[in-house]
Amino acid sequence: MTHSYHDITTAPVRVKLEKSAENPYNLTREGALTDDKRVERYVAHTASFKLMYSTQRINDSVLNSLQQLADECGLIKQFAEMRRGAVLNKIHNYDSECRQVLHTSCRDIFSDSPKEANATGQARVEIEKLRAFLDDLDSGKIVNEKGKTFTTMVTIGIGGSDLGPRSIYEALKAYSKDSRVVHFIANVDPDDAARVLEEVDLSRALVNIVSKSGTTLETLTNESIVVERLLAAGLNPAKHCLAVTGQGSPMDNPQKYLRSFYMFDYIGGRYSSTSMVGAVMLGFSLGVENLDRFLHGASTIDDLAENAAIQQNIPLLLALLGVWNHNFLGMDTVAILPYSQALHRFPAHLQQCDMESNGKSINRQGQKLSYKTGPVVWGEPGTNGQHAFYQLLHQGTEIVPAEFIGFRNCQYQKDLQVSGTTSQQKLMANMLAQSIAMATGQKHENPNKVFSGNRPTSILLADKLTPETMGELLAIYEAKIIFQGFLWNINSFDQEGVQLGKILAGRILEQMQARRGNGDGIETQFLDVAENTANTTVER
């Protein structure tokens, strides 16, 4: 499947959008948010979420142009091709990974006619293996050496094998099975593993090691630390360790691991939370029913994302609004601001998913780009962030578009009224107020109290953070990122940017081994590698 599509530079509607960007909608004008029922009209829906975007600097003309941009760039066609197995992870005429992109197949398991039958078939095999394993845990068929059940899981992985799954676990702790706890070790910093192991009774713990290649330096190092601790406690690692890895990798070893679950080349690490990378841990902590609810939520968005009408397709609309702010209005970053403490690690996951996907400076033909691609993505939960960095969002010289995420109801249903309102009402009031304040600003005779306004925001609102809505939220942002990559005509599915550092780290480690004990310090090793690498081609 190879087609030629317009991109953001060649789409005919670009000229119209550039003209509109010269005088974008003024949110600070009196009546700007109430004219023409703007607040009611600028709303889009999924099964669970409402996207409120009246506080973006757009009008109907810009929306129509963005629709035209999506059509001219073939965004829906490319997304549909991706789901059906097109080889999109490639750079034409240059060496690249040259793979399909089929993370959506992991949650297409509920369909009678999946979009890519082979990949979904493999996902079904793995999910059935996982169901059987979890059943054996729950029934007591799998126990530790003393006949006791496993109550803890230690997941070892890094990057896409850590950030996404960890953020979802944190988001859904309220739905965890009684007595089931998960800990994570990611950083090769030995203090990360030491801290976790101080808190864990390894005799009751499963150790879940996650690496597609089976060769990830940080993951294998941390695995060795945990295995050494298991052995020191008189425990058999083969009865405690699970592997989530590529079939046939060095970690695909039944002599070494209690069970192996497979991840496949067509699923990129940062898009792998709904594969076995996330499912093994989430199935252990949430149980099978809640895991299914999470996967089903994601699958509903995958289907919705094929809707060509941008006002009925939240991921596509978010992508286009982001490109409007970034490429046409010149805003370099975007803040993801969840008004939910459970989502406190979700911005970190999106930071990786977005910046590793779209932090590219060549197009899919290998040509250097003349326009901006991925923005810097960052964020923290509200209301904490209001007391940290919102000063810059309101009055700083940098204009930062903000995407708020909120829920009408709290997870634990343990709330009470203080001064006439509940804590959840206070949380939502703050979120709505921040969005309005950033948009409309404030005039004042004291310049220190002037808020310039015209700082674009949007609000994603759902009833409650549940397994279904978490699945939806994850898939919304995955699809948003992919649509933006299509618009910029870049490969959002590789990550060459991490390779050079890995290679050079390997060289420095070799020097550390060779020079052990001769007094040479880190500075010497840095200089030697720098001199030998400058302006040379480094092969993998």
Image (tube, grey):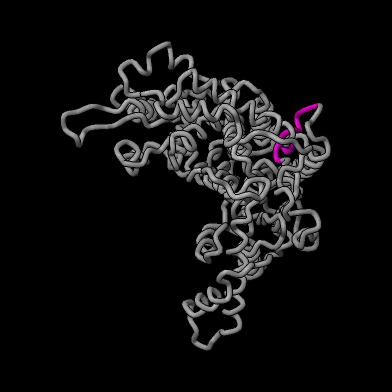
Image vertical order of residue 526 relative to residue 154, above or below? below
Is residue 467 in sight in this rendering? no
Is residue 379 in sight in this rendering? yes
Residue 79 spot, x, y in % from top left: 69, 33
Name which residue lies at 42% across and 11% down: 36
Which one is in front, 285 or 122?
A: 122
Image vertical order of residue 301 relative to residue 174, above or below? above
Q: Classify residue 115 by image quadrant.
A: top right
Q: Indicate yes or no whether the magenta region holds residue 106.
A: yes
Which one is in front, 219 or 282?
A: 219
Residue 378 spot, x, y in % from top left: 46, 44
Which one is in front, 186 or 134?
A: 186
Q: Residue furthest top?
A: 36
Q: Residue furthest bottom?
A: 518
Q: Indicate yes or no whether the magenta region holds residue 257.
A: no
Is residue 57 toward the left or the right of residue 178 in the image? left
Residue 456 spot, x, y in % from top left: 41, 30
Is residue 358 toward the left or the right of residue 436 in the image? right
In the image, the segment drawn in magenta is: 103-112
* Magenta span main SS: helix
Is residue 491 toward the left or the right of residue 345 in the image? right
The quarter of the image holding the C terminus is: bottom right
The quarter of the image holding the N terminus is: top right
Residue 301 spot, x, y in % from top left: 64, 29
Image vertical order of residue 181 relative to residue 192, above or below? above
Name which residue lies at 74% across and 37% down: 105
Name which residue lies at 16% across and 29% down: 445
